[in-house]
Image (spheres, helix red, strand yellow):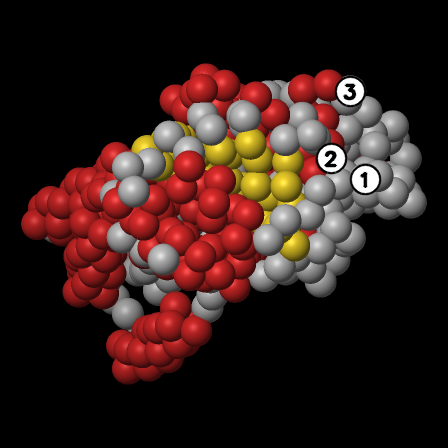
Amino acid sequence: MDFSLLAAGVSGEGATPAWAMLAYLAAGVFFILALRGLSSPATSRAGNRNGMIGMAIAVVTTLVTHDIANIAEIGVAIFLGGIIGVTIARRIAMTAMPELVAGFHSLVGLAAVVVGFGAWLDPQSFGIADEATKQIFAVSRIELGLGIAIGAITFSGSVIAFLKLSGRMSGSPILLPARHIINLGTLAAILGLIGLYTVSPQGGAAEGWMIYAIAVLAFAIGFLLIIPIGGADMPVVVSMLNSYSGWAAAAMGFTLGNSAMIITGALVGSSGAILSYIMCRAMNRSFISVIAGGFGADAGAGGGGGAREQRPYKQGSAEDAAYMLEQAEKVIIIPGYGMAVAQAQHALREMADKLKEKGVEVKYAIHPVAGRMPGHMNVLLAEASVPYDEVFELEDINSEFSQCDVAFIIGANDVVNPAAKTDKSSPIYGMPVFDVDKAKQVFFIKRSMGGVGYAGVDNDVFYMNQTVMLLADAKKMVEEIVKSLD
């Protein structure tokens, strides 16, 4: 969840009124309630509503309590931004949500850079310069440098994540020679420049080369950190960039003296970091390697770039699947990105309802990174009115596959690939996956045998003795199964 930068036109005149501080505190409480609500599909709508209320309080308070240069221009900007946001929200498909989030993160990072440069160019208007010497305070220089650097890293890194997630750039890792040395050297240069800028006796435009150098190097390291990361690990990258955008906003909040930005930026930064840590544990990745920007990018890792071996597999029909499903006592459904692309969630729920009418126990298994982003599958299933008590996470349901009659995989791939457990050369090695190979019968809906998962690796589940491939569009296949169940 992003809380955009506030109060880009703050004046440094006077102290913030007591009522404004209380209003910012109230906004912060609403933001905390928003994060709490978004932790569960059952309370996610209330969480979104609380976030909007908190943002409205923060924006209105900032506009009322600060000397805005031109309120009409601010109003027009808010109106146009709102129109664009509503239009995108109405038109965007759920399958494009991960790249949309990455794109929005880039805007937050760019906003931090713009605000930072604005404060550097006119520090007295922001109340961060000494009236007598006209020099920016030392602590404000640190805040400016960090805010611009983190914002620039967020912007360029999010652009790369957007390009990879949207398919405009290859999801394969792009490995530069000595990339870790380059990254560490660039980071050291950024920190050194911030330190030099902080202690420099000069002020104003004379220090321009330092600020510009910090921004350029930060933009560069944002690209360098993300391009070595493969597509299978992109969900963690998006979460980490979300954290970066929060810290950038918090740094600018200190510069602007805006407590709302400090509170919301810290909330976004810390929650994004915690989510990244949880996802790293779910995928058996190192949290430190996320920050280093090289995990999931072993030069010796296997991938989907080579020719695939032609192996025998069983192909079935909707009638075959319907017969086995209604004969089963327990069915576990594993939805994935293919279900989202086909918008098959409503047909899937209808199929599950018919099976339950016939006395079949039905459960849904959701991987922590299903659909390329946490919560993606939960939202789609909630949209189809799937009961929350039928949806289970990996750690809660994985032990039940050995007792289930049918594992019904619809559009998932990497999260059921046993190579994650057995093949050390695989780019997904170490990532926890569903033990569908232990189920008595597996039905696997897939468009064709030619495609592979987002990680670009083949899946041994396709060729197991108990697996029947249902090669078709996910929605059409499920609709055919529903007709056969009738």
Q: Amino acid at mark 2?
A: Tyr
Q: What is the secondary structure assignment of the residue under circle 2?
A: helix
Report the residue marked by disc 1.
312
Q: CA distance from mark 2 to mark 1?
A: 7 Å
Callout in the foreground (3, 2): 2
In the depicted structure, whether residue 85 falls above or below residue 427: below
Expressed as whole percent of the image width and height from the top left, the position of residue 54 reads: 20, 52
Disc on res. 424: 3
Cβ atoms at labels 2 and 1 below 8 Å apart:
yes
Q: For this view, does 361 lie left or right of residue 15?
A: right
Q: In the image, 76: left or right of 52?
A: right
Q: Residue 321: in sight, yes or no?
A: yes
What residue is rendered at 14% in x and 45% in y? 26
The residue where tag 2 is placed is 463
Q: What residue is shown at x 20% (from left), y 55% (from top)?
A: 49
Q: Are marks 1 and 3 in contact (CB under 8 Å)?
A: no
Which residue shows up at 54% across the image and 25% down it?
A: 439
Q: Nearer the viewer, mark 1 or mark 3?
A: 1
Residue 56: where, in percent of width, then height? 20, 60
Up the image or down, 307 lies above or below 101; here it is above
Amino acid at circle 1? Pro
**Residue 258 visible in this rendered orientation of the protein:** no
